[in-house]
Image: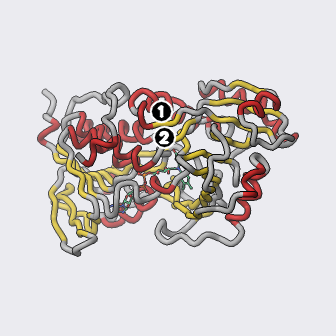
């Protein structure tokens, strides 16, 4: 006979996209759930990202696993979060001969990953997006889209809450408490009052993104996460209707996302020691403006409204240059192998892949607790983000 999920209290550390999706999956399978987040919902990397609902096309050639994860989850999110997405598609634009020469490998990669990709002539692309550089040599249309990161998390959390989850913001985990051979709970500090509270838990899931190495270290465990920063530049105008990507291997300044009333230009990649207070290296902002203007020249005539940086939680055992060589896939770590059963970490990935990341870690929770509850997050529609504050 399988164990009952409501007999287990599961603590999720972090309310970014990974923690939010994990809380939803756990609550849907009947676990008692508490989410603790040291700041506001999505106040980590999720709230500062590029907002691109990846089709996976960007990774089709160099990172096929991530490409496949992205397209699968893109299609799932269209079903379960229909009201929360802008489904405007993307154009992968060939600016020069090198981009044009990349097209056959790109189309092959898309076909292998199952990403619909339709080649367009330059004239067809310019008819769709008149602000594109008139000298482009062609483009490929892919099913990219746009999300709003805060609301993305609220969709998951509103649903988790409706299924009984408690979400505690401004609550920083300062200690992971061990009992004899198992996790006991966490000590949480209210970041506004300084008061420390002890919360018992049978399972603790570390979903602290680029901070997951730091959180794991609180329990004496190791997670090989490499915080790798990227700069974002926001222009106070929508310069395109669709997402604009450069038709090339992922590199600097090759994406423009129309997001709410802005265009988001990005990004770059450099390893950082921590994910707090990231200093943007000289030249990165100008480089974003110069490179994205090769696709949309109007970028040059709009002074930026905002500039910020965030760190990707990339998984790697050693520093690999600027981090571009590291996969955008994710991994689940069971710290039982470090002598702490009941402590798990889920990290890496993308906001777009948050649901499947959650599925994997909650499958592991079920295996470790003996609970037989299948994942249903592929089918169950999420509640509106508006319901979170009801
Ligand atoms: C520049 C850039 C652009 C990107 N663009 C995209 C994109 O367009 N599309 C996409 O899908 N992905 C994108 N990504 C990747 C994506 O943003 C991340 O993979 C994703 O946001 C990670 O989510 P997370 O929940 O794991 O981490 P986070 O969002 O960082 O969440 C972790 C949370 O843990 C909290 N926390 C940390 N320590 C503690 C503690 N001790 N106690 C309690 N809480 C704690 C933090 O406050 C934070 O809110 C981008 C990443 C970067 C850097």
Quarter of the image with the N terminus is: top left
> Looking at the picture, how far across and down is residue 23, in whole percent?
29, 44
Q: Position of residue 201 (x, y in %)?
A: 18, 53
Q: Residue at (13%, 39%) from the top-left corner? A: 6
The quadrant where residue 354 appears: top left
Which residue is the site of mark 1? 73
Asked if labels 2 and 1 touch by Cβ distance under 8 angstroms, the answer is yes
Q: Nearer the viewer, residue 141 or 28?
A: 141
**Residue behind label 1 places its C-beta within 8 angstroms of ligand 1:** no
**The one of 190 and 72 positioned closer to us in this rendering:** 190
Mark yes or no: residue 286 visible: yes
Q: Quadrant of residue 283?
A: bottom right
Q: Return the x and y of residue 340 as percentages of the image width and height.
A: 27, 55
Tell me which image quadrant ligand 1 sits in.
Answer: bottom left
Q: Is mark 2 within 8 Å of ligand 1?
A: yes
Image point (61%, 61%), residue name = 231
Above or below — where is 34 with respect to 210? Answer: above
The residue indicated by pointer 2 is 352
348 is higher (above) or lower (below) than 108: below
Q: Residue at x 20, y 62 (%)?
A: 178
In this view of the protein, can residue 105 be seen by the observer? no
In the figure, residue 112 lies in which quadrant? top right
């Amino acid at each position: 006979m399988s164990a009952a999920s409501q007999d287990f209290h599961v603590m999720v550390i972090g309310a970014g996209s990974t923690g939010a999706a994990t809380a939803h999956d756990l609550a849907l399978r009947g676990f008692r759930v508490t989410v603790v987040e040291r700041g506001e919902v999505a106040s980590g990397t999720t709230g500062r990202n590029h907002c691109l609902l990846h089709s996976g096309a960007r990774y089709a050639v160099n990172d096929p696993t991530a490409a496949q994860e992205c397209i699968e989850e893109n299609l799932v999110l269209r079903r379960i979060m229909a009201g929360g997405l802008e489904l405007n598609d993307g154009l992968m634009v060939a600016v020069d001969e090198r981009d044009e020469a990349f097209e056959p490998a790109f189309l092959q990669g898309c076909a292998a990953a199952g990403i619909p990709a339709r080649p367009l002539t330059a004239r067809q692309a310019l008819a769709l997006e008149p602000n594109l550089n008139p000298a482009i040599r062609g483009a490929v249309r892919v099913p990219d889209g746009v999300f709003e990161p805060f609301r993305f998390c609220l969709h998951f959390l509103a649903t988790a809450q409706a299924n009984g989850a408690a979400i505690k913001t401004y609550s920083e985990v300062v200690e992971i408490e061990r009992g004899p051979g198992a996790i006991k709970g966490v000590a949480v500090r209210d970041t506004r009052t300084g008061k420390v509270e002890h919360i018992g838990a049978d399972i603790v899931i570390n979903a602290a993104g680029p901070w997951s190495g730091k959180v794991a270290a609180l329990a004496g465990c190791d997670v090989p996460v490499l915080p790798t920063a990227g700069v974002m530049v926001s222009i106070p105008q929508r310069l395109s209707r669709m997402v604009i990507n450069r038709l090339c291997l992922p590199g600097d300044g090759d994406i423009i996302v129309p997001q709410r009333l802005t265009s988001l230009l990005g990004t770059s990649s450099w390893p950082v020691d921590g994910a707090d207070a990231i200093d943007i290296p000289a030249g990165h902002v100008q480089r974003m403006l110069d490179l994205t203007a090769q696709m949309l020249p109007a970028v040059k005539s709009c002074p930026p409204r905002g500039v910020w940086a965030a760190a990707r939680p990339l998984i790697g055992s050693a520093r690999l240059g600027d981090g571009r060589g590291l996969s955008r896939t994710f991994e689940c770590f069971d710290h039982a192998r470090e002598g702490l059963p009941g402590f798990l970490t889920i990290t890496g990935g993308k906001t777009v892949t948050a649901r499947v990341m959650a599925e994997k870690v909650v499958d592991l929770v079920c295996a470790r607790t003996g609970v037989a509850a299948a994942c249903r997050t592929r089918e169950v529609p999420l509640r509106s983000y508006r319901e979170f504050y009801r």
